[in-house]
Amino acid sequence: MKNKPIAIDLFCGAGGLSEGLQASGFDIAAAVDFNKSAALTYQANHTKTKFINADISTLEVKDFH
């Protein structure tokens, strides 16, 4: 079984890039955005992706595990 490439969607908004990446065969490991409205939409459409609702400048590597 071939491994899929993995992506992290930064500044993800509602998730358009994640949709395109998934359609191209990527697994989305995590997504980040600080906008609460975008977060609600992203989470509704990407239920299996870890979503981090935070300012990216405050994150550390451990936040993605």
Image (tube, rainbow, N blue to C red):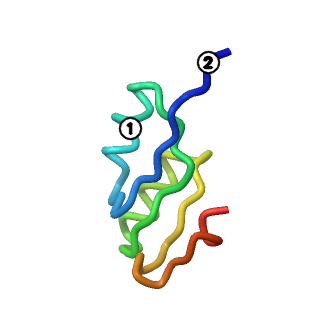
Q: Quadrant of residue 10?
A: bottom left
Disc 2 secondary structure class: loop
Quadrant in which the N terminus appears: top right
Above or below — where is 37 with respect to 30?
below
Q: Residue reaching furthest top?
A: 1
Question: Number of numbered discs present?
Answer: 2
Amino acid residing under circle 1: Glu
Residue 46, percent from left and from top = 51, 46
The mark found on residue 34 in the picture is none
Q: Is residue 61 left or right of residue 31?
A: right
Above or below — where is 41 with respect to 28?
below
First of labels 1, 2 by sequence position: 2
Question: Which residue, given by chain and number where applicable, does mark 1 sit on?
Answer: 19
Q: Residue at x 42, y 56 (%)?
A: 41
Q: Quadrant of residue 14?
A: bottom left
Residue 50, percent from left and from top = 59, 56
Q: Residue reaching furthest bottom?
A: 58
Residue 11, percent from left and from top = 33, 63
Question: Which residue, given by chain and number where applicable, does mark 2 sit on?
Answer: 2
Residue 2, percent from left and from top = 61, 18
Amino acid residing under circle 2: Lys
Mark 2: few, some, or many residues within 10 Å (few <14, many ≥20)?
few
Q: Residue at x 37, y 50 (%)?
A: 15
Mark 1: few, some, or many residues within 10 Å (few <14, many ≥20)?
some
Disc 1 secondary structure class: helix
